[in-house]
Amino acid sequence: MDLLVLDQGIDTSTAAGRMFFQIVGSNAAFEQALRSERAVDSLAEARARAHWWAEAEARGSPGAAGQAQVRGVR
């Protein structure tokens, strides 16, 4: 099965058309891989921030308000 787009001059029955289609597909796969990498990096960063906050609260650091302190402020 071939794709023929008249207004854009794309014809996958020719070598140039097949190459164009493969390049577009490769770009789409590349963009998907980048999105996946960014998602993994974002989740790792969020986990690191949550871990740091939990440790600070456990140490009783001045910047970490506990639930009792939060209720007292309300």
Image (cartoon, grey):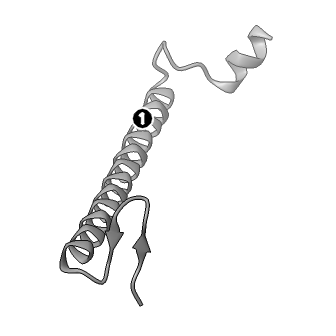
Quadrant in the picture for residue 30? bottom left
Above or below, comparing residue 72 to residue 41 in the picture = above
Q: Amino acid at mark 1?
A: Arg
Q: Quadrant of the N terminus?
A: bottom left
Answer left or right for 50 relative to 20.
right
Crowdedness near tag 1: few (<14), some (14–19) or many (≥20) residues, C-alpha within 10 Å = few
Above or below, comparing residue 15 to residue 6 in the picture = below
Between 74 and 59, the residue placed more toward the observer is: 74
Residue 55 placed where, x, y %? 43, 34
Quadrant in the picture for residue 15? bottom left
Above or below, comparing residue 22 to residue 49 in the picture = below
Between 62 and 43, the residue placed more toward the observer is: 43
Answer left or right for 38 relative to 60.
left
Q: How many marks?
A: 1
The residue that disc 1 covers is 49
For the point 38% across and 59% down, the residue is 8
Residue 46 placed where, x, y %? 44, 40
Outermost residue toward the bottom? 1
Residue 69 placed where, x, y %? 68, 16
For the point 32% across and 78% down, the residue is 12
For the point 25% across and 67% down, the residue is 20
Secondary structure category for the residue under label 1: helix
Residue 42 placed where, x, y %? 40, 43
Outermost residue toward the front? 6
Between 59 and 17, the residue placed more toward the observer is: 17
Answer left or right for 14 relative to 56.
left
Outermost residue toward the top? 73
Between 68 and 39, the residue placed more toward the observer is: 39
Q: Quadrant of the C terminus?
A: top right
